[in-house]
Amino acid sequence: MNVSKERTIKNLNELNDSEIVELCIKDVNIYRYIIERYESKLLRYIKRILYVSQEDAEDILQEVFLKAYKNINSYNSKYSFSNWIYRITHNESVSFLRKKNITVSNTEDDSIFDRIPSEEDIEDDFLNSVKSIEVREILSKLEQKYQDVLILRFFEEKEYNEIAEILHISTGTVASLISRGKEKFKILVQRYGKNI
Amino acid sequence: MGKISKKVIEKIEKENIKPTGRWSFVLKNSFLWSLFGLNILFGSLGFAISIYLFESSDILNLILSVNDLIQILVLAIPTVWILLTVMFLIVAYLNFRYTERGYILSFKKMFLINLLAILILGSILHILGVSERLNRVFSESFTTYNQSIDPRYKIWSNPESGYLAGTILSATKESMELEDLDGNIWSIDTSDAKVRRAVGLIVGEKVKIVGNVVDESTFEALEILPWEGRGRNLQEKHF
């Protein structure tokens, strides 16, 4: 019995997202494989875009999974499930912001710029520099639209077409937002006399 | 089972949450596509009527002979229909934007594609005569349509400027009696008038006349044009 159950679990873990989605429509318990596959990624993503406590992030994440389950039939298996659930997460996060009537800017304290490592070069290694906490804090000073694309690109390491699918904007718009976002990011850093 | 997955599954079971049926998403998407199609069609009809009304004002025929060209051109623009066309264009864009993959095209690309669709389909509908028929339907169905929307009523109700239109009440070789668009009766001297081929000069016919006011009820016609269409060619024989 246990062997059979273990084999089933192993088999389910080997299935791709679309296949599990098909199964969880029939059996809600299978939905936990989806949740477990994505919870840590999405929790991290929520905290990156919202600056909320662990508790708030978990509440939002629960809502994400409930909403995803209710709308599971709208998922089209021709496309990536990951992008689909990231989109729901993004929308729930935006909705959380609206409900709380807050903007994503975690600090008014400009001293964060003094903590930026100066040896890194934004032109040559934006991807690496953007990962540091200090740089992330600068990101929070940018407009939401730039934060959205830069976080997905440099923290979640999504491709342009994936970002387009998550944010429901064209890939051309993604490219220009990333480009302009990076420029604005550099200006913010230069304003405070630091190179990263 | 993880903490979050346990909570979520428990909530789903406790509240008996069921996934929304696939049909409702298919229906929503089909509805948006239908609205998109309808708005493109309405936009095209709006554009077709705009072409028809502009063309029927005969401004292009008068372009070399009028002094007040800009003023006349402004009057000839069927503003209401152009605004309606733009409105349908915007709504069509919004419909498309909210379809399942509507985000793929940028605003500029989508707007241009919709605009091209409306311009091409509108031109085809105009060539097929749909615009003329539809304009007639509006004209007959709504009492204020002609005065407020059809630019011909603004341009061709200016006898002082040389533009007069109306219905022929009687006609002879040298003159005719005409009831203008405001209901005034005019005696028209047609002895030196050039008459467009499409004009029959028969009782009950609606015509446009370029000429000069002689006195408060007499008008000297220099050119007589049909009310509908452009009647490009002149009759060989002058009255």
Image: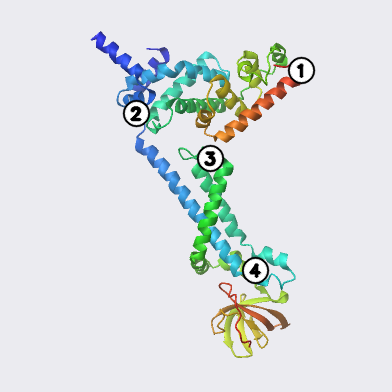
Is any atom of residue B229 visible in this view? yes
Q: Amino acid at mark 2?
A: Lys
| Nearer to the camera, B65 or A61 | B65
How far across and down, in percent of the image, does residue A69 sit? 39, 26
- Mark 2 or mark 3, earlier in chain: 2
Which image quarter is the N terminus of chain B in?
top left
Q: Are marks 1 and 2 on the same chain?
A: no
- Mark 4 or mark 3, earlier in chain: 4
How far across and down, in percent of the image, does residue A151 sit? 57, 22
Cα separation, mark 1 vs mark 3, equals: 39 Å
The residue at which mark 3 appears reads as B105
How far across and down, in percent of the image, does residue A161 sit? 52, 30
Is any atom of residue B144 visible in this view? no
Q: Chain of mark 4?
A: B
Q: Which mark is residue B60?
A: 4
| Dot 3: element | loop
